Image (cartoon, grey):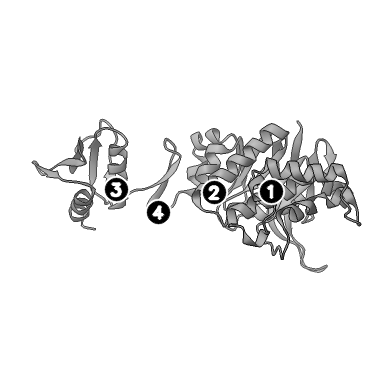
Amino acid sequence: MSGLTLEGLDLGYRRGRRRAPRAVLSGVRARAAAGELTVLVGPNGTGKSTLLHAVAGLLAPLAGTVHLDGADLLALPAAERARRVAVVLTERVDPGLLAVEELVALGRHPHTGPTGALRAADRAAVAGAVTAAGAAHLAGRRVAELSDGERQRVLTARALAQQPAVLLLDEPTAFLDVSSRVALLALLRRLAREDGLCVLVSTHDLEPALRLADHVWLLDRSGRLRTGPPEQLVADGAVGEVFDAPGLAFDPVTGTFALHGGASGPTASVVGAQPVAALAARLLAREGWRVAGPGAGEVAASVAAVGDGRFAVTAAGATTELAGWSELAAWARRAAGT
């Protein structure tokens, strides 16, 4: 398979000659294909950055191998590895007075050598990278003047200017707003498709990652790595197993996290047109209710969305009409005792 292959990778940190290394991950096996967006997800402290740094050649593994298209990636000379693998780390970059094109041109260093002199082919690669990253409208501006989202596109362009086979990004969405996070992941997926890149991204943005990734590497708190299409990991219950918490559960149908009232919360049924009924169910869950599915047995209350922003609530044999969302929220809070 064209792309990255990890075999028996043990990762950790050496602590001198007389002390055993501190192990972080053991026996890691995974693949990331060319032409696909692979996303690495997991709770904090599970070793995502450690794994990405090892794949990038920034951390020597204690054991195991990383192969790119059959070649031992970590055995390659540093200059050759820099031409084949581009890395965008999570640390903020101080660009000084560099303009966008000047920062992107730094990505040509593995090809230009110590002089850094750009030939026509290098300038064409820089221009192409800026366009591919959706940053052409930023040309001529100082990097220091850019927003976080704009700067991330420029850093991605710098990596693309290397013309790598593999693009590695560690938490590229960390400083971005919601729409910019989704846009960046969509951009990376498009680049993988159009340029045949093997793109591996670590992120905490689970919900958009599951929607946009072709393949997911899922790390749990024990260091176990499970891989597969996102739909497979959701259907198998692996995502919920890793991320569910008290009062919070991953909903495999919506692909989002939902609050639930727990065993002691009252139960309600909700009916009505969508998306109003789904929003009403979410409101009830926030106020400590358990929302029953279709065909549920006896419930403490039935909520019906009756149109024009109104709700009919039936509880204890009496029906009350509520005039809107604020009244529904107030009723749910009182009735649940929250």
Task: State the CA–CA distance, disc 2 to disc 4.
Answer: 30 Å
Q: For the residues carrying marks 3 and 4, which lies nearer the camera in this image?
A: 3
Task: State the CA–CA distance, disc 2 to disc 1.
Answer: 14 Å
Let me know if residue 180 appears in the view. Answer: yes
Task: State the CA–CA distance, disc 2 to disc 3.
Answer: 27 Å
- For the residue marked with disc 4, what is the amino acid? Pro
User: Residue visible at 59% across and 50% down?
Assistant: 203
Q: For the residues carrying marks 2 and 3, which lies nearer the camera in this image?
A: 2
Task: State the CA–CA distance, disc 3 to disc 4.
Answer: 18 Å
Give the crowd class for mark 1: few <14, some 14-19, many >=20 residues within 10 Å. many
Residue holding disc 2: 180
- For the residue marked with disc 2, what is the amino acid? Ser
User: Residue visible at 81% across and 69% down?
Assistant: 18
Viewer-closest of 252 and 37: 37
Residue holding disc 4: 246
Q: Is residue 146 left or right of residue 285?
A: right
Label 2 or label 1, whichever comes before in sequence order: 1
Residue holding disc 1: 156
Label 3 or label 4, whichever comes before in sequence order: 4
